[in-house]
Image (cartoon, rainbow, N blue to C red):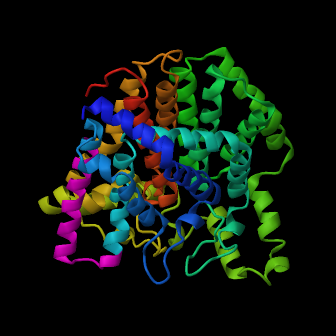
């Protein structure tokens, strides 16, 4: 069977009887990881470190089995497979040497194996999944925007609200640093529709609410990431189109500007709710946890919070790099997955294992070889989409251009943000990002008649 015939047959089979998987993935991404956030990602089998993400990987392997083992994969998937195999060798080395606990090795290795989603979803079936994700986001944009605002403004409270099982966080909790990239992503999803449809007033409101979620965050790295991604979109993607700027301005004026002017600062607002009113809710929630969370939010000082300031982060990164440079082995292969990078500065929070920088984390765990593999996957994806979008025009290849534009902005927001946090080690950020990027790559390969070369 020729490749073109196989793709045609595959798409027909999806339409006839395999739509269940795209629907499940779309709702897991939109309402699981984006709407609920970190709490949803933390759900796992009782007594076992098998989370939603690992279950989704297993189901995805089953769904994409035919594509992979009948050699119907594109060159981009082969590149990502090379990256995954490379990281697998590093993982095997760490397991064999046994320098760290196996549980911690698996936990840190998740930063690398989440990239499997990028490989799986970049195949021909990713086209249908992409369309379903956009359909769900477009239909429930207001609810998702509202959830992002709630995560930003009520974070200290939600972190301990409705805890399920032995997970430390509540089921409806998203770290504030993860909100701005998602808010930018939702804004661009709505703005990019302008080439085909008019933006409704409810979509304007969702854009405004998303702006509020970005503005109210106190995570500087995430805020920088959101602003850089929006600036990139306005200057290079939309090329300063009056229509884009006007839609952004209207959404901002309707919701964001009045909110910023009339509401007190976010810290005053949170203090009013979580400090002055904590005695009213102590019957349901831990007073100690609320105070600890709020203290870490407004007073990042002392030994427990030494890595939460800008100077503290830079000191941390330098320390990790210097530790790795002590020998040629650690320079090339790192300290191994399972190494707590907080030990380099005696960081007080034992639950935080990364150095709040995706690239420093990879260097600390996997050395120069890990950096090269990670760059092949992440920077390679960015360059691929950057090059691909130049081949399409909005009229003839709307879906492919839409996929490139939204994927690029989403990836840029996360990439910049991940220079200051551990978001790419978190399933709540990494899994929706890699699945969406994989599906976007699929749109580039299979939704147009153009031949995408390397």
Residue toward you, 317 or 253? 253
Which residue is found at the position 53% from the left and 69% from the top?
42
Q: Is residue 268 found left or right of 25 in the rendered image?
A: right
Q: Is residue 330 found left or right of 382 in the rendered image?
A: left
Residue 47, percent across and down? Answer: 46, 84
Which residue is found at the position 31% from the left and 22% from the top?
451
> Does residue 42 lie above or below 280 as drawn?
above
> Does residue 110 lie above or below 252 as drawn?
below
Which residue is found at the position 60% from the left and 33% from the top?
188
Q: Is residue 427 visible?
A: yes
> Which region shows up in magenta?
79-103
Q: Quadrant of the C terminus?
A: top left
Whether 174 is among the magenta residues is no
> Does residue 373 lie above or below 151 as drawn?
above
Residue 380, percent across and down? Answer: 31, 37
Residue toward you, 14 or 402? 14
Which residue is found at the position 53% from the left and 64% from the top?
41
Residue 3, percent across and down? Answer: 27, 32
Residue toward you, 301 or 193? 193
**Quadrant of the image occupied by residue 249:** top right
Q: Is residue 326 visible?
A: no
């Amino acid at each position: 069977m020729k490749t073109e015939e196989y793709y045609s047959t595959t798409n027909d089979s999806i339409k006839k009887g395999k739509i269940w998987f795209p629907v499940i993935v779309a709702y897991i991404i939109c309402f699981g990881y984006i709407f609920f956030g970190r709490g949803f990602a933390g759900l796992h089998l009782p007594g076992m470190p098998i989370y939603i993400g690992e279950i989704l990987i297993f189901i995805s392997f089953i769904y994409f089995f035919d594509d992979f083992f009948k050699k119907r994969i594109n060159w981009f998937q082969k590149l990502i497979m090379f990256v995954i195999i490379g990281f697998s060798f590093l993982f095997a080395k760490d397991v064999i040497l046994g320098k760290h606990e196996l549980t911690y090795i698996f936990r840190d290795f998740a930063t690398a194996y989440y990239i499997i989603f990028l490989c799986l979803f970049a195949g021909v079936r990713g086209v249908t999944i992409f369309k379903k994700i956009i359909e769900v986001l477009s239909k429930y944009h207001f609810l998702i925007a509202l959830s992002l605002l709630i995560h930003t403004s009520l974070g200290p409270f939600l972190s301990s609200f409705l805890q399920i099982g032995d997970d430390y966080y509540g089921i409806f909790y998203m770290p504030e640093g993860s909100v701005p990239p998602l808010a930018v992503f939702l804004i661009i999803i709505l703005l990019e529709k302008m080439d085909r449809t008019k933006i409704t007033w409810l979509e304007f409101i969702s854009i405004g609410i998303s702006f509020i979620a970005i503005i109210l965050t106190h995570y500087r790295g995430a805020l920088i990431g959101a602003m850089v991604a929006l600036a990139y979109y306005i200057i290079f993607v939309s090329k300063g189109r009056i229509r884009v700027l006007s839609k952004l301005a209207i959404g901002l004026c309707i919701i964001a500007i009045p909110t910023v002017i009339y509401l007190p600062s976010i810290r005053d607002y949170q203090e009013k709710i979580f400090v002055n009113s904590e005695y009213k809710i102590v019957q349901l929630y831990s007073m100690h946890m609320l105070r600890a969370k709020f203290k870490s939010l407004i007073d990042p000082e002392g030994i427990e919070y030494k890595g939460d300031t800008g100077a503290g982060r830079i000191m941390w990164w330098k320390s990790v790099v210097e530790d790795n440079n002590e020998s040629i082995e650690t320079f090339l292969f790192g300290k191994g997955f399972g190494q707590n990078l907080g030990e380099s500065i005696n960081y007080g929070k034992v639950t935080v294992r990364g150095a709040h920088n995706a690239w420093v984390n990879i260097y600390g765990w996997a050395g120069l070889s890990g950096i090269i593999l990670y760059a092949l996957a992440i920077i390679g994806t960015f360059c691929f989409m950057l090059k691909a979008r130049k081949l399409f025009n909005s009229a003839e290849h709307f879906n492919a251009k839409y996929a490139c534009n939204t994927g690029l902005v989403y990836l840029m927001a996360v990439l910049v943000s991940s220079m200051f946090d551990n978001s790419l080690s978190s399933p709540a950020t990494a899994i929706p990002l890699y699945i969406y990027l994989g599906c976007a790559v699929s749109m580039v390969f299979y939704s147009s008649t153009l031949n995408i070369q390397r």
